[in-house]
Amino acid sequence: MKKPFFYLRTRIFLSMIALVFVSFLLIGLSTNFQITESSYYYHELRLDRKESQLQRAISYEFINNINPVKSQIFRDKIFKISDIQNISFSIYDLNGNLIQSTFEESALSRISQDLIDKINLAEKKKYVEIKKVGEKQVRESYSIIYDYNNEPIWILNLPYFDDDKLNVYELRSFILNIVQVYLLLFVLAIIISYFVSSYITNPISEIVYKMKQMRIDKLNKKINLKVTSREMFTLVNSYNNMVDQIDQNIKEISKSQRELAWREMAKQVAHEIKNPLTPMKLSVQNFKIKFDPKDPNVEKKLDEYSKTLIQQIDVLSSIATAFSSFAELPAQKNEKIDLISTTKLCLEIFNDRNVVFKSDLNKLEILFDRTNLIRIINNLVKNSIQATNDILEPKILVQVKKINKSALIEIIDNGLGIPNELKEKIFEPNFTTKTKGMGLGLSIIKNLITNYKGTISFKSKKGETVFTIKLPVD
């Protein structure tokens, strides 16, 4: 399964920030659209009002007294209306010819027949043409002027320039205000989203942490959190119930494993005990049959007989000792010890020039049981010595290193090596490559190291075997 790029807390945090940002964009865009639409209808209504005022003014002046269009009186009245209304306009006849304009030069001398047709076909005999003049938008309104008989006499042309300065100012002011508000909201959203995301994800993080700490060799802890949401309560409660079930299953599995291990161990011990008991029984039977008190060598035979029994009794004693050592669960003592000096001290008892210690460190402190550490090193070095008995030039190297936050102990020998088919069984309790013993040494070592959260591994080939112990450094 592909690992998600963001944590849930980050996703909640970013989602809330994105929500504020998107709402800001949507409000800004909708406001801009609304102001643009309002501006469009505002100019349209304003043009209608101006045109209506102008129509009424012209009707008032000319509807009952139409002067000749070329007369000075007509011209003066047109300019009078323009001055009073503060509006510039043009008047055309019904054929599109210019009659009079209050514009000095910009008025068209004639309007096209196509435009006249559009005016006549338009509702209310009014047509508005929108066009661009430079950067400004101009609405050219063309409408029919009627006489007192409601007969069309002229065409009124009223140009209107859309002035959006006020709307632009309002939009900018609004955007500036909303930016200030949303900056405050953005800061508040960051703070609130941080606490909300933490509140939501803390129980989940606690569950993840507890699940990472979950082990089958110890009692797992439940989660005790004050949660107010029903979902988080259900989640935490489900986890605690799962812990109870797992612990119960672990106890049952551990019990069955212990029982199985003891059964296997009992079989192994019984088998090992039978080995010396058989020759002891045969020896006693043979001695009973052949014993002659008058034999001149009776003392010698008794001595040999007693030595045979003592030898077999010693074998039984060693079996009992090995079994006791494996069954023993030593108390774990976490004491701070110097790995370098302890290893050197341990190797002194061998007094063998073939055993060499090497380390670039003067001191390396770890938390471990000093007695158990000596026991581990002794066992591994003894194994290396026994593995090199048949080598002409035996070499055993014990070296200590520090890699990152781990201490490494390596025991290297140049013995014959461990055969491939035996490597998987090397740490099994009842496995041994020796003719004597029960094969409990490496199994005990592994148990001891595991108790201190360490590991033991090995690599072996002909001419070289390396056992590596990895322990955490405090």
Image (spheres, grey):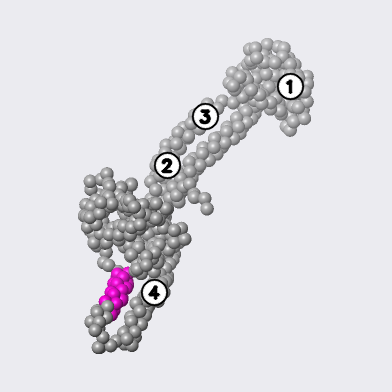
Asked whether residue 220 is in view, the answer is no
- Residue 268's disc is 4
Give, as a three-letter code, the residue at label 3: Val
- Indicate whether 407 appears above or below 159: below
Image location of residue 436, percent across then percent down: 35, 68
Q: Which residue is mark 1?
A: 154
Q: Residue at x 37, y 54 (%)?
A: 415
Residue, disc 3: 168
First-in-chain label (4 vs 1): 1
Single out the mark in the foreground, 4 or 1. Answer: 4
Residue at 36% over, 82% down? 282
Circle 4 packing at 10 Å, graded few (<14), some (14-19), many (20+), is: some
Q: Nearer the viewer, mark 3 or mark 1?
A: 3
Which residue is pictured at 64% across the width and 25% down the height?
A: 139
Q: Residue 14: percent from the left, percent from the top? A: 46, 45
Q: Is residue 30 above or below residue 244?
A: above
Secondary structure under tag 4 reads: helix
| Relative horizontal placement of residue 324, taking residue 422 as reference (left or right) | left
- Label 3, label 2: how many angstroms apart (C-alpha)? 26 Å
Residue that badge 2 annotates: 186
Using a 10 Å C-alpha cutoff, classify the residue at mark 3 as few (fewer than 14 neighbours), some (14 to 19) or many (20 or more).
Answer: some
Choose the circle earlier in sequence order: 4 or 2.
Answer: 2
Element at label 2: helix
